[in-house]
Image (tube, rainbow, N blue to C red):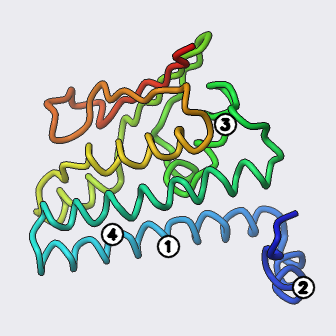
Amino acid sequence: MSEYPLGSFEDRKILAEIPFEKLLDFFFLQIRNLWRVDGLYFLEIEKLFGTENATQIDASVWEAMAVLEAKSLQKTFNIVENPDTPTIMKLLRLTSWALDHPFKTVELFPNKAVLSVNRCRTQEARLKKGLGEFPCKHVRYSYLKAFVGALNQEVKVNCVVCPPDPRPNDLWCKWEFEMQC
C-alpha cells in the first residue's frame, strides 16, 4: 500500500456499498471530471493569455502529472524498476489521460509499442465550439516522454503524427515507444 492511505475508511466503506457496475460508471465519471477541469482551466488561460501561453502552461502541468502518475502506478501495481515496453504500455493505459479514452489502439511488438488515437473528445469538443484544432503535440509529447522516462530511461517516445501536424481524417495522433538497448 502507499505511504498515505488511498481514501479514508469511511470513503472506502461508501464505495464498497456501490454495486460493481455502478462503481465502474462512477470511476469513469471521475476521470471525465478530471478532463473537464483540465479543459475549463485551459480555456480560461487561453482566453486571458492566448493559445501559445496556455499550451506552455498545459505542457508543464501534464509533464509533472506524468511523473506523479507513473511513480504512483508503479508503486500501486508493484512494478519493478525499468519495466519493459509492454509493461509501460499497460501502465499508460491506466493513466488519467488514457483510461477513459475509448478510441485508442495499442499495438505491441518486440521492444516497441504503437499507440494511436483515432478520435479525440477534446479536439472534437473544440471543433464543435468553433475554437479550432488544438495544437496538442507539445503537451502530449511532454506528458508521454515524462511518463515513460519516469519508468525507464531506455524507452524513447517518438511522435508519428499529432496536431498541428497534417493528419488523415481517421487519426488524431500516433506515438511510438521503443526500447533503445
Separation of residues labelled 4 and 2 (CA atoms): 32 Å
For mark 4, what is the residue? 39
Q: Residue 18, position in %: x, y? A: 83, 76
Residue at horizontal 70 percent and vertical 31 percent from the top: 83
Separation of residues labelled 4 and 3 (CA atoms): 25 Å
Element under disc 3: helix
Label 1 or label 2, whichever comes before in sequence order: 2
Are the residues flagged by discs 4 and 3 in contact, CB closer than 8 Å?
no
The residue closer to the viewer here, 37 or 146, is: 146
Label 4 or label 3, whichever comes before in sequence order: 4
For mark 2, what is the residue? 9
View extreme (bottom): residue: 10
In the rendered structure, the answer to whether residue 23 lies left or right of residue 43 reads: right
Residues packed near mark 4 inside 10 Å, few (<14), some (14 to 19) or many (20 plus): some
Residue at horizontal 31 percent and vertical 51 percent from the top: 139
Separation of residues labelled 1 and 3 (CA atoms): 23 Å
Q: Residue 6, position in %: x, y? A: 79, 74
Separation of residues labelled 1 and 2 (CA atoms): 23 Å
Residue at horizontal 41 percent and vertical 59 percent from the top: 62
For mark 3, what is the residue? 90
State the quadrant of the N terminus.
bottom right
For mark 1, what is the residue? 33
68 relative to 49, above or below? above
The residue closer to the viewer here, 78 or 99, is: 78
Separation of residues labelled 1 and 4 (CA atoms): 10 Å
Three-letter code for the amino acid on which mark 4 is drawn: Gly
Three-letter code for the amino acid on which mark 2 is drawn: Phe
